[in-house]
Image (spheres, rainbow, N blue to C red):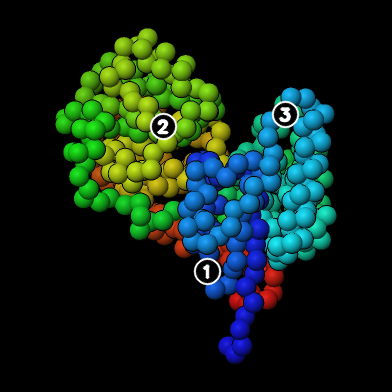
Amino acid sequence: MGGSRKKVRIVYIIGTLVPGGAERHVVELVKELDKDLFEPIVYCLREKGALASQVEQIGVPVKVMGIVNCCSRLQFMKLILKVIWKMRNALKEDRPHIVHTYLYWANVYGVIAAKLAGIENIVTSRRSLGAYKDRKPWLQWIENMTNIFADVVTANSKEVYNDTLQREKFIAKKLTLIYNGVNESTFKRSHIDTESLRRKLHIPENHYVVTNVANLHSYKGHLEFVEAAAAVLRRQSNVCFLLVGRDAGMQSELERLVKHWDIADKVKFLGVRQDMVDILNITDIQVLSSYEEGFSNAILEGMACSLPLVVTRVGGNPEAVIDNFNGYVVLPRNSDQLKGAIMKLLSDHHARVAMGERGRKRVEELFTLKVMAQNYREMYCKLDKAIGS
């Protein structure tokens, strides 16, 4: 192909890059994009967050728009208008070919700013079920209005796709499904010094490890996870339970329960970890106990590390974990089923290994970063013909 091909500039808009599922997805997508074709920029509505350095290290700018919590609703509304105008000015200066927004308020503010800036191609994202909007119908009305101006709306699971199609207006011909992906070269079973990490975490040599990776929000189902842990430990004492994730308001309540059931030496709150591959490599079973979910990156990482999964039947969980194939799928808010699935896996080494191997193969076939990035590239190509095929 003769001549130089212009790079397609994409501005990604998200609330912040603190560790979380959508935030990690944006970082991984930006890192995986072909930099000969694409020139990404990230706008954060609030602060940068701990993950920002990962994209800045590869030369991708991260700009902060400056939303902060204010004392009154009127002050906050004035700030929002100011931020939208600031974002509009930044977009006019950066002149992206495509604006791609993530999560509710970034979808709303980002679409408004993009239209004010005259951006031709606007992509918004749906990464969870919309049940949270049932309590505040005006949220859906606003989102419907912004759908008018979006060119493409991405969903990260079939369940999210169908839920969005059912709930939202002005969206039917714009909606497309693109699954999350995981770096299977990074997340894999490896021969790390697992004993050293187990000692650091005070996990006895003969103990199994059951790990839940999710920020400590109420809807992530940690109450049932801890309740199931207590029930398992009443039957089998050589098990440790790890909770990995940022405290989003639940940790003190969970710690009270752990103390009440006298299992504090068996349940460990690890917070945000930078060594997730190592954590997963000392894990025997991974659990996701959410009440609601879009499509979990944590599940894919566990599958890539050849772990059997126990997940709840919500959102895209059953699209990744096939019941009795690479794990078990249980009802949400049901600690008895959670306990039963964990006990079944603890008692069957062969099943743990076989399910883990099937999960790894499933990731390699369907859920790699390369597959995800290629799907986004194809979607961007349709929006901006200058990229080529």
**In the rendered structure, which disc, 3 or 2, sits on the residue that comes first in sequence?**
3
Q: Which residue is mark 2?
A: 271
Real-space CA distance between mark 3 and mark 1, rounded to the nearest whole angstrom: 40 Å
**Which dot marks residue 34?**
1
Residue 191: percent from left, percent from top: 21, 50
Image quadrant where one finds the N terminus:
bottom right
Point out the frontmost of discs 3 and 2: 3
Real-space CA distance between mark 3 and mark 2, rounded to the nearest whole angstrom: 28 Å
Residue 151: percent from left, percent from top: 75, 58
Q: Which residue is mark 3?
A: 70
Residue 184: percent from left, percent from top: 38, 56
Q: Is residue 42 visible?
A: yes
**In the rendered structure, which disc, 2 or 1, sits on the residue that comes first in sequence?**
1
Q: In the rendered view, does 199 fall on the left or right side of 57?
A: left
Label 2's element?
Answer: strand
Residue 284: percent from left, percent from top: 28, 37
